[in-house]
Image: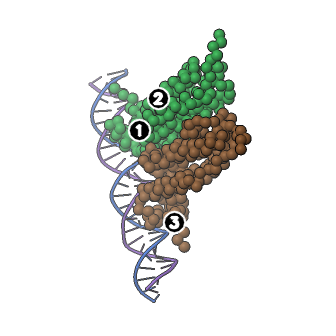
Chain colours: A green, B brown, C purple, D blue
Amino acid sequence: MAKDTKGRILEAALELFSEKGYEGTNIREIAAALGLVKSSVYRHFESKEEIWNTLLDEMIAYYGQRFGSADHLPPVPDTPEGLTELTMRMADITIRDEKIVRIRKVLTIEQFRDGRARELATRHFLTGLTDMFARTFEAMMDKGLLVRGDPEMLAFAYTAPVSALIRLCDREPDKTQWAMERIEAFSRHFTETYGMHETGRV
Amino acid sequence: MAKDTKGRILEAALELFSEKGYEGTNIREIAAALGLVKSSVYRHFESKEEIWNTLLDEMIAYYGQRFGSADHLPPVPDTPEGLTELTMRMADITIRDEKIVRIRKVLTIEQFRDGRARELATRHFLTGLTDMFARTFEAMMDKGLLVRGDPEMLAFAYTAPVSALIRLCDREPDKTQWAMERIEAFSRHFTETYGMHETGRV
DNA sequence: CATTATAGTGAACGAACGGTCACATGTCAA
DNA sequence: TTGACATGTGACCGTTCGTTCACTATAATG
């Protein structure tokens, strides 16, 4: 059968670490989460630390594959309102996808203890979103949909509030609906401030 | 002499918890930080958990006293540029004050494990700053310094990016200077977008 | 069929943990 | 001087931690 026990251990570890942290989780719990006893875990990993490091490798790779590659760039909206739609779609995915939620949570918890977690946290919470939207905004400026200006600055001003609300959902999931409404309201406010409609030139 | 050992224990606990988390810190380290052995700590606290709960009480009280009371409201700027100055002053304090930094870090780490930490985290990272600046912005609108609009929305759009950069400093202190420059640049961008200069009416 | 590799187990290990307690100090009021 | 109280200590406790290992069951390979 070989049902990829190694992968299931990493899954369980991510889930537990994201709730109770690395130090707050023990090997017995991880094993129990897949119906094993702790010694079985050591068939697949040499130590608890190796689980953590492998998990980090996986998270880094996952981020690169999901947000880093060029073919995953979001489509450039056709209208200022399209930016809001795009944002809502992306926010919805990033809040619903349990794996991404858990990655954000574990990076939040462990960022002060582990250097690699620190770097990935900065990319997740700050630079990654900014870079991505900077390119989108630049394209929108070229299309005459957004007022001309520093696309990086605009992207930062746009993504930081959205990111803050996404992190609120991580912390207090029962406020998800409220947060989504706030994201939409903020996005509309943003497009009303910076958005332009095409002049219709052919 | 009675040199407030209880208070010093709380100080040491805050420092250690903010770096390694509650579970990652043990009583021996806390005791050693003030030159004691662990059993001495139990003269002042019944358990590790009581240290944690007392610390949380203190953090909640500290926040209320520091940011909650009306007499600590920041002065309303006289010009749009004054908003940037005010922001830089507040950011500088909040990044330099080690106690506040540690409180933010420990709330970041423990927000998923402790309900009270969760609530205080939301206030620290989201609602507190927004509420405070909403009042400032409302006053600035009344004075004709800021374009009319929803002060809450504007405050959220303003404080969320600043907060994101402050949290970057918590995570990567060597990027503090860069972050401060970004805060200033963002604040200037913001006042250029929404700021107005008085018409000079008497 | 015998063999070899793989995955899982229960018992046991030393170390570290949070916590207790009898005891040694020092301080200060009666 | 005495007694009471607060503070600090070292030895010790039971538990839990991460980790090891001899052993079993299973499945694939020659």
Residue at x 68% of width, y 37% of height: B196
Q: Is residue B66 depicted above or below B162 in this figure?
A: below
Q: Residue at x 50, y 56 (%)?
A: B61
Q: CA distance from mark 2 to mark 3?
A: 49 Å
How far apart are labels 1 and 2 at the CA level? Answer: 14 Å
**Relative depth, front residue between B21 and B66:** B66
- The amino acid type of the residue labelled 1 equals Asp
Determine whether the residue tagged by mark 3 lies in a helix, strand or loop: helix
| Left or right, residue A20 beside residue B189 | left
Q: Residues within 10 Å of mark 3 (few under 14, many from 20)?
A: some
Q: For numbered disc 2, what is the local secondary structure?
A: helix
Q: Position of residue B159 (x, y in %)?
A: 59, 41
Q: Residue furthest top?
A: A202
Report the residue marked by disc 2. A92
Tell if the residue under mark 3 belongs to the same chain as the one under mark 1.
no
Residue B59 is situated, as x and y percent measured from the top left of the image, at 50, 54
